[in-house]
Amino acid sequence: MADPARARKLAKRIKQIVASALEHEVKDPRLNLVTITDVKLTGDLQDATLYYTVFGEALNAEPDFKGAAAALDSAKGVLRSLVGQGTGVRFTPTLTFVADTVPEDARKIEDLLAKAREVDEQVARIATNAKPAGEADPYRQPRETDPED
């Protein structure tokens, strides 16, 4: 089991190497809009899981996750070689690429929050003109004690 600080440093270095390689070394056009978001290493530093996201070419364009996954899979050997050269560790970790769903999940949460705000505004508009259903003061008043009791 490696030191957690060492594992974090190695994961950060792997992220830098792979991101730089995707930008400068690998010439696959499907990887132009791929960004490495996070790297997780196993405790023995044998396996690295790289999380990536793909941005759409235009603001409303749908990102090509399948094409990016195929391109990353085909470039895995080159990227692993570059990681081995750049880190200098005895055993170069195997690379596994996983699509990062955080941006998509964040977008869904933002949509849900917008809907909740709309419903809250509707409730607030209805409540401004609302009147109590029963008495004006529905809470029970404390009983007055009779001095003779």
Image (spheres, rainbow, N blue to C red):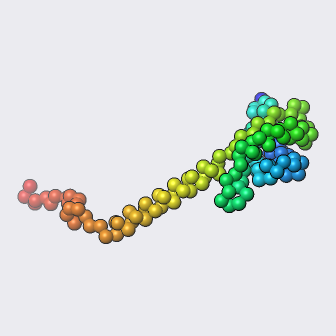
Quadrant position of residue 144: bottom left
Identify the residue shown where x is 77% and y is 41%. Answer: 70
Q: Nearer the viewer, residue 130 or 81?
A: 81
Quadrant position of residue 74: top right
The count of marks equals 0
Q: Nearer the viewer, residue 90 or 115?
A: 115
Quadrant position of residue 18: top right
Query: Is the residue 56 above or below the residue 69 in the image?
Result: below
Identify the residue shown where x is 82% and y is 43%. Answer: 14
Query: Is the residue 29 above or below the residue 123 in the image?
Result: above
Identify the residue shown where x is 87% and y is 47%. Answer: 26
Q: Where residue 107 sits in the image (x, y, percent)?
A: 60, 54
Q: Where residue 20 sits in the image (x, y, percent)?
A: 85, 50
Judge whether residue 73 can be spotted in this image. Answer: yes
Identify the residue shown where x is 82% and y is 51%. Answer: 29
Where, quadrant-wise, is the C terminus in this rendering?
Answer: bottom left
Q: Nearer the viewer, residue 124 or 149?
A: 124
Judge whether residue 20 can be spotted in this image. Answer: no
Q: Nearer the viewer, residue 149 or 29?
A: 29
Q: Where residue 2 sits in the image (x, y, percent)?
A: 79, 32
Q: Which residue in the rendered view is the most extreme toward the left?
A: 148
Where, quadrant-wise, is the N terminus in this rendering?
Answer: top right
Q: Where residue 47 sits in the image (x, y, percent)?
A: 78, 33
